[in-house]
Amino acid sequence: MAATEADFRTRLQDWLPKLVLAPSFAVTLLFVYGFILFTVVLSFTGSKMLPKFDWVGFENYGKLFALPAWSTAIANIAIFATLYIVICTLIGLMLAIFLDQKIRGEGMLRPIYLYPMALSFIVTGTAWKWFLDPGIGLQRIMQQWGWESFTFTWIKDGDMAIYTIVIAAVWQTSGFVMAMFLAGLRGIDNEILKAAQIDGASNWQLYRRIVIPLLRPAFLSAFVILSHLAIKSYDLVIALTGGGPGRATEMPATFMYSYTFTRNQMGIGASSAVIMLMTIAAIMVPYLYAELKEKKA
Amino acid sequence: MSVATQDTAVSTGRATRVLIYLILLLFALFYLLPLYVMGVNSLKPLEEITGGNMMALPGQWTLDPWRQAWSTAQIGVEPTGLKPYFLNSILMVVPAVAISTIVGALNGYVLTKWRFRGDTWVFGLMLFSCFIPFQIVLIPMAVVLGKLGLAGSVPGLILVHVVYGIGFTTLYFRNYYASFPTELIRAAQIDGAGFFRIFWRILLPVSGPIAVVSVIWQFTNIWNDFLFGVSFGGTSQPMTVALNNLVQSSTGVKEYNVHFAGAILAALPTLVVYIVAGRYFVRGLMAGSVKG
């Protein structure tokens, strides 16, 4: 009897770790992968207001890509993601390199650059919405300060509104990118730099030939995080422009929401979500795979 | 901070340094600008915004916009102010952060110290879940919350945030525990300590730095979430959704000063957390991600 009890206890100890992990794994399988499967299946059905399971093949995808609103959303995400990623990376890298030059007051500047990351996109959107509003914001401020001819109406202009989203999004995350690059810079061995200096390399050469190539991992992390944030951008668009003026700032995230929940075109909404997932997966899966493989080795 | 002593060995000329300081200060102004605009204009009567200059300090200081935003402003159809929504957010965020952090710590412990065949796959699947666009789960989540009777409730939102938060918390704790010497765990095991005892006595006491990261990350993400709140909030909407309703309301005069006060109220908890513990966050995050 005692033997079996001891036996049971060792076996329990063997199983305990897996038992502890099991609920999380089960939840992930169900709520992530099960749900993805559900949405994929829905995207092949004629669901309108509620999920229905009448198979329609690729009809929703055909309709989706024929919709002008979706074309706008795709064009917008391409403009937004490119500018957002490039500008955030450039500003982040520049600020990190500058802050790394034995700057007095670094301890004061860093939190100022970083705090926007703590805010909700709804707060950021509200602040910029009114600051960029021609009636009360920047345009009027400049005119009152004496620059009578100054105009800035991007947020009301269908062709330019998308760039106001870039401004607000860059404001929110470029400081965080700075922190990532700064951590990378601080990890570089100063001996390498000193050796290159002795060889007569100029500062420009030093950064272009040695430092920036060494920051490769930081570039990669920044790219992955920024592209992920870009595709998910829903809150900022809603708060800043509401997708307007008209549909000028429609993005895949806002498109999916409005088609699914307000226009009762669930099948089309589901197919747009599937396209979004595939885009992110194309970026994330190779990155995660490489990361995990590296750590295993 | 300790990293500040490891500045680069690169040296620069005087003119370059002046330029660098100038650019750094200009960017500091850029980052502070919206905060200044929100702060200053939340303390003015409305006429000073519509008739004056947004950059000017208040001529007549007033706390009325704050009072209105907190307790009387029209949110949707009810003139309740943001107060009830602030409470919703607190009720949602505290349990969701606590649960996801505890679960993440246990998962990280198992995945590093009790490795089994296929554990990298389990972790990989959980990790990918951090990066999915949540649009892909909105429809089935709405169905499931409805079936569970949790639609439009705070417990429903807690469930959603825990489910989609454990990927990140597991990642943080796993990376952190990976650098903890496994020999110590084995030694304790030989001495007869069990699974939970080892966790409680050996790993938990050294988990402070990563617990800070996990708590701040989860707190900011959940407090700032809008998509889940607007989709599943129903009558228990969080602060972000209420703020958006306040700002976007199309009826009546746009009370910019009240909007700004509301925006600051919505930002305050995460700002406070950031000011109090932000440097530990960056330090911990970098330690975790750089070392891996």
Image (tube, coloured by chain):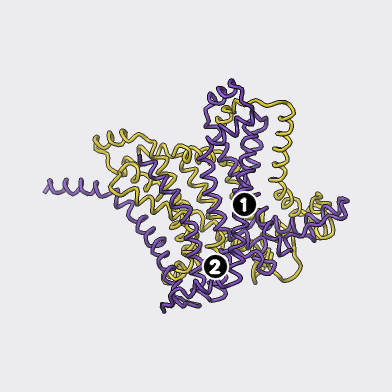
Chain colours: A purple, B yellow
Q: Is residue B9 visible?
A: yes
Tag 2's secondary structure?
A: helix
Above/below status of B84 relative to B184: below
Q: Chain of mark 2?
A: A
What amino acid is found at the position of numbered circle 2 in the picture? Answer: Met
* Whole-number angstrom distance, CA of label 1 to CA of label 2: 21 Å
In terms of depth relative to the viewer, which is nearer, B284 or B43? B284
In front of the other: B260 or A128: A128
Toward the top, the furthest residue is: A198
The residue lying at 81 percent from left, 60 percent from top is: B50
Secondary structure of the residue carrying tag 1 is: helix
Compared across the picture, whether A60 is left or right of A33 comes to: right
| Amino acid type, label 1 | Tyr
Q: Which residue is mark 1?
A: A84
Query: Contact (CB < 8 A) between labels 1 and 2?
Result: no
What is the x, y in percent for residue B290? 48, 38
Rendered residue at 46%/71% (across/down): A43
In the rendered image, which quarter is residue A81 located in?
A: bottom right
Can you name the residue that lies furthest to the left here? Answer: A1
Crowding around mark 2 (Cα neighbors within 10 Å: few <14, some 14 to 19, many 20+) is many
**Residue B75, horizontal then vertical, whole percent:** 65, 67
Residue closer to the observer: B56 or A220: A220
Label annotation for residue B172: none
Q: Nearer the viewer, mark 1 or mark 2?
A: 1
Residue B192 placement, left or right of B24 = left
Q: Which residue is mark 2?
A: A256
Q: Quadrant of residue B30?
A: top right
Q: Position of residue B144 (x, y in %)?
A: 42, 69
Other-residue count near label 1 (Cα within 10 Å), few / some / many at <14 / 14–19 / ≥20? many
Q: Is residue B67 visible?
A: no
Quarter of the picture containing the C terminus of chain A is top left
Residue A190 position, x and y percent, is: 55, 26
